[in-house]
Amino acid sequence: MTDNEKTPWDRIPSIDMEKEDTQTGFIKRKIDRKYRRADLESLNKVLDEKVSFLPAKLASNTSGKCKGMILDISACGCRIAVPAQLEEGESVMVSFAMHKRSIMSRAIVRWVVAHSHVYFVGLEFQGMSENTKEFLWAISAVAMMDSVEIDKMKEALR
């Protein structure tokens, strides 16, 4: 078939339906996490103040300062929604408050997914104090327990 005989449909390149290595790597990274992340619904089981989102501030050399929302968190990192485009591998500062604690940490951007005018970003905390890391680990772990265990932990924290 010559180019002149081709219809517009014939000119569309074929699509390889195999999974791309980038997709496989992305899925594998999510499965192979060091620590399971607790989402806000789970965190609300243990936090004294119930939140529909966990506000955060983020600063980077390329995007400056912006406000965002932490969507889930673990001792090693978090998923955050921000209005600023960040680059994978970029160094940032992130700060937020949780359970009457102010937390600030350096972080590395591990992945970015653009959605409309919002960017979902995976951050890996860097240089966080052991005390803060243990606190985040404990909050995340307790958030995934059932309500009876949670009530016992809340009582112990008071």
Image (cartoon, helix red, strand yellow):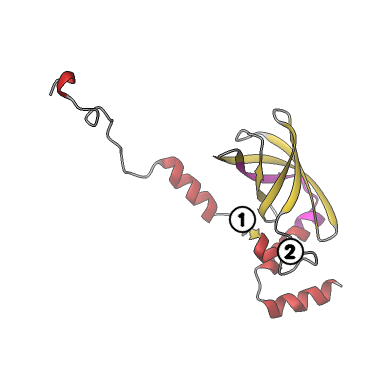
Look at 30% across and 39% down and name the residue there. 16
When the figure is inspected, residue 5 is found, relative to residue 27, above or below; the finding is above
Asked which quadrant contains residue 23, the reply is top left
When the figure is inspected, residue 54 is found, relative to residue 144, above or below; the finding is above
**Secondary structure found at label 2:** helix
Look at 73% across and 29% down and name the residue there. 61
Disc number at residue 91? none
Look at 84% across and 56% down and name the residue there. 101
Residue 132 belongs to magenta span = yes
| Residue at numbered disc 2 | 139
Magenta stretch, residue numbers: 119-134
Question: The residue under label 1 is which amino acid type?
Answer: Lys
Position of 143 with respect to 33 (left or right) is right
When the figure is inspected, residue 35 is found, relative to residue 157, above or below; the finding is above
Asked which quadrant contains residue 144, the reply is bottom right
**Secondary structure found at label 1:** loop
Disc number at residue 34? 1
